[in-house]
Image (cartoon, rainbow, N blue to C red):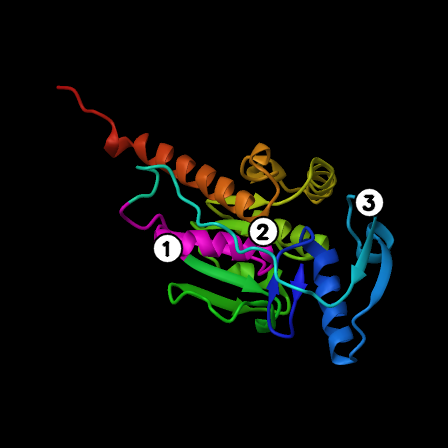
């Protein structure tokens, strides 16, 4: 991943680890100290439920990673009308990939949320409404109960709080990025709070299509569009009426 003072290209997997790595890289740049190696325990240091440890090496970059290739959706999958509100939680690489692919479709009214405006890229499409909220879960009460939600924040604690707030508030659909371990631990805690986590889709998309942010975004949007298309086709006013 390449980090500049104002932007990021590529990814080391997203989440709290990447958020911390970006902050560290920019701190090193500010101090003109480009070299560093560190090993980070994901559980104790970052509160990630997946466990393990990751070693990172920081150095000056010779070139940026290749730009992602444009994605295309199957013919007939993209509707010619709005499907309502889609709230995207998190401006990391997966969130950016979802916005990058969803905005040109004009299939949703897109609301994009993160904890600070510095987390967003400079070139946000005009059709997207960016919102900065230090306490993102508190913003849930302003979401329409008919909205769709996709959760990709940099913190498992924020992800869990968003799931809890959304289950309490109500939604049309909700997808959460995560491993099977994350799902198991989240759902256990949400059930203990008297909530029904089975309404949340996790993992999202089609994991077999890959873990690159653009692959996750494409498969997630494809599943969402197909689901909404099937619901629309089965609606009472779309069923044939026989005399």
Judge from the rendering whether residue 233 lies leftward or rightward of residue 67; answer left or right: left
- Badge count: 3
Q: Residue at x 87, y 56 (%)?
A: 39
Helix, strand or loop at mark 2? strand
* C-alpha span from label 3 to label 2: 20 Å
Q: Residue at x 71, y 58 (%)?
A: 18
Quarter of the rendering occupied by the N terminus? bottom right
The magenta-colored residue range is 80-109
Q: Nearer the viewer, residue 161 or 209?
A: 209
Could you tell me if the residues under marks 3 and 2 are in contact, i.e. CB atoms within 8 Å? no
Please tell me how crowded label 3 is: few (under 14), some (14-19), or many (20+) other residues with Cα within 10 Å.
some
The extreme front residue here reads: 62
Residue 6, position in %: x, y? 60, 73
User: Foreground mark, 1 or 3?
Assistant: 1
Helix, strand or loop at mark 1? helix
Residue 73, position in %: x, y? 39, 41
Q: Nearer the viewer, residue 145 or 221?
A: 221
Q: Nearer the viewer, residue 87 or 7?
A: 7
User: Foreground mark, 3 or 2?
Assistant: 3
The extreme bottom residue here reads: 31
Q: Kindly identify which residue carries mark 1.
A: 104
Residue 231, position in %: x, y? 37, 34
As drawn, the label of residue 151 is 2
Q: Kindly identify which residue carries mark 3.
A: 51
Chain-order first, disc 2 or disc 1: 1
- Is 129 contained in the magenta span? no
């Amino acid at each position: 991943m390449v980090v500049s003072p104002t932007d990021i290209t590529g990814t080391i997997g997203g989440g709290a680890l990447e958020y911390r790595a970006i902050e560290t890289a920019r701190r090193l740049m500010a101090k003109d100290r480009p070299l560093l190696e560190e090993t980070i325990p994901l559980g104790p240091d970052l509160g990630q439920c997946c466990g393990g440890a990751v070693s990172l090496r920081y150095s000056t970059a010779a070139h940026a990673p290749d730009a992602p290739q444009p994605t295309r959706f199957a013919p007939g999958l993209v509707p010619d009308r709005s499907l309502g509100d889609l709230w995207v939680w998190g401006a990391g690489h997966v969130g950016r990939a979802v916005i990058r692919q969803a905005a040109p479709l004009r299939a949703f009214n897109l609301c994009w949320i993160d904890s600070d405006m510095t987390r967003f890229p400079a070139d946000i499409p005009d059709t997207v409404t960016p919102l900065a909220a230090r306490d993102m879960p508190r913003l849930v009460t302003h979401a329409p109960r008919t909205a769709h939600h996709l959760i990709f924040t940099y913190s498992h604690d924020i992800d869990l709080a968003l799931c809890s707030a959304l289950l309490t508030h109500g939604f049309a659909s909700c997808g959460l990025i995560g491993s099977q371990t994350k799902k198991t631990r989240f759902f256990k805690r949400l059930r203990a709070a008297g909530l029904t986590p089975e309404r949340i889709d996790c993992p999202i998309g089609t994991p077999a299509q890959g873990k690159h942010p653009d692959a996750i975004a494409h498969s997630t949007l494809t599943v969402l569009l197909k689901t909404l298309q099937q619901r629309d086709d089965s609606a009472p006013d779309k069923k044939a009426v026989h005399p």
